[in-house]
Image (cartoon, rainbow, N blue to C red):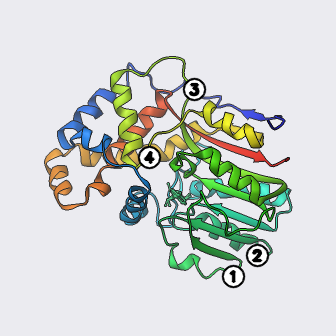
Amino acid sequence: MARDSTEYVTDSTRGKHATEQNDNLELYLGQIRKIFDTSRIIEAPRDKQQVVNYFLLNKLSYRLGFNWDGFIHCGISYDGKSKREDFRQQARMIERYIIDNDARNVLELAYGLGPNSAFLASRNPDVTFEALDIANKPLARYTKIPNLHFCYSDYHDLSRFEDNSLDIIFVIEALCYSTNKLHVLREVKRKLKEGGVFIVFDAYTRNRASQLSPSEKLMWQLIFRGCALETFERVDKVEAEMRKDFSIVMAQDLTTYVLPSLEVQESKARHYFNHPAVARAINKVLAFDVVKHLPMVLLMPTSVRRQIGCYYLHALKNDR
Ligand SMILES: C[S@@+](CC[C@H](N)C(=O)[O-])C[C@H]1O[C@@H](n2cnc3c(N)ncnc32)[C@H](O)[C@@H]1O
């Protein structure tokens, strides 16, 4: 097992949000049941092809819902207000590792529409960036950056890259799609140089002592099944897997800071759920894979306020 000298950064504002007594969980679940057969969302197949279909079908809705730059992830808002710039925050944090490690070769797993690597490659022309994704094509404007190369690939198989060749590998909100994270971690370790860093931004189930209530359980299932996920694993379980091959040099709880961007999405979703007749008509026209994530959008902030969902940055060092 690798040595551990982790810097833990906890979320000091945690617990200051609404609690079970004054949030909208029951109201929201009632609104969702008026529009959806919740078991259809929960029991939908969740194999690799479903993940691919989900992201291909939702390319436009993610751009409309999140932002036109193509980020399919939460913004990180340190001042409590969601702004366009906040979606670049993950890439800015990764850039610090690129600079500090004097990195020359960087790989992004699961680039989505390509904005993270595009941002970093434009600002760091002497660094070579590779990026892969299983479903999406990058936006056309990101394909013209000379030091950035995109390819279709599954992050469970990194054989196209040379062993010990990469300084930094990163993944934003996509490792959660793996049901075999240990395998991905081992692939990544093999491709990283000694001293190289793997950076993971992702959502998890918070380590909790108490059981979820039936309503919370339904909420949580609607959230992860709504975006074609098997589950969100607990932070401590994934950290235990990370420690098998890496030293965790940073574990930062960013949950409070992603809440503002989630709340913007929640308020947009409320328009749809407040008009059930219109919503049902929309559902008849659009593919189920497109609308099934709307309960997730509505419920995500409640899961955070109830201390069930959480969002972390982990930086893992390959010290062999
Ligand atoms: C929530 S999006 C995040 C996209 C991007 N990282 C971002 O920050 O905008 C998740 C992405 O993971 C990709 N993905 C899921 N499973 C994958 C796999 N096994 N290999 C490669 N990409 C995968 C999906 O195609 C999708 O583009």
Q: Secondary structure at mark 4?
A: loop
- Select label 2 or label 4 by which is in front: 4
- Select label 3 or label 2 by which is in front: 3
Q: Residues within 10 Å of mark 1 (few under 14, many from 20)?
A: few
Residue located beneath label 1 in the image: 146
Query: Which circle marks residue 125 in the picture?
Result: 2
Query: Which circle marks residue 229 in the picture?
Result: 4
Q: CA distance from mark 1 to mark 3?
A: 43 Å
Q: Are marks 1 and 2 in contact (CB under 8 Å)?
A: yes
Q: Which amino acid does the dot numbered 2 rest on?
A: Pro
Q: Which amino acid does the dot numbered 3 rest on?
A: Asn
Q: CA distance from mark 1 to mark 2?
A: 8 Å
Q: Which amino acid does the dot numbered 1 rest on?
A: Pro
**Relative vertical location of residue 33 with respect to residue 320 in this rendering, above or below:** above
* Nearer-the-camera pick, 169 or 120: 169
Q: Which of the two labelled residues, at mark 2 and mark 4, occupies the earlier sequence position?
A: 2
- Select label 1 or label 3 by which is in front: 3
The answer to whether one can see residue 96 in this image is no
Q: Residues within 10 Å of mark 2 (few under 14, many from 20)?
A: some
Q: Residue at x 58, y 27 (%)?
A: 14
Q: CA distance from mark 1 to mark 4?
A: 34 Å
**Relative vertical location of residue 210 with respect to residue 43 in this rendering, above or below:** above
Q: Which of the two labelled residues, at mark 1 and mark 2, occupies the earlier sequence position?
A: 2
Q: Are marks 1 and 4 in contact (CB under 8 Å)?
A: no
Q: Position of residue 6 (x, y in %)?
A: 79, 35
- Select label 1 or label 4 by which is in front: 4
Q: Are marks 1 and 3 in contact (CB under 8 Å)?
A: no
Q: CA distance from mark 3 to mark 2?
A: 40 Å
Q: Which of the two labelled residues, at mark 1 and mark 3, occupies the earlier sequence position?
A: 1
**Relative vertical location of residue 115 with respect to residue 47 in this rendering, above or below:** below
Q: Residue at x 40, y 59 (%)?
A: 49
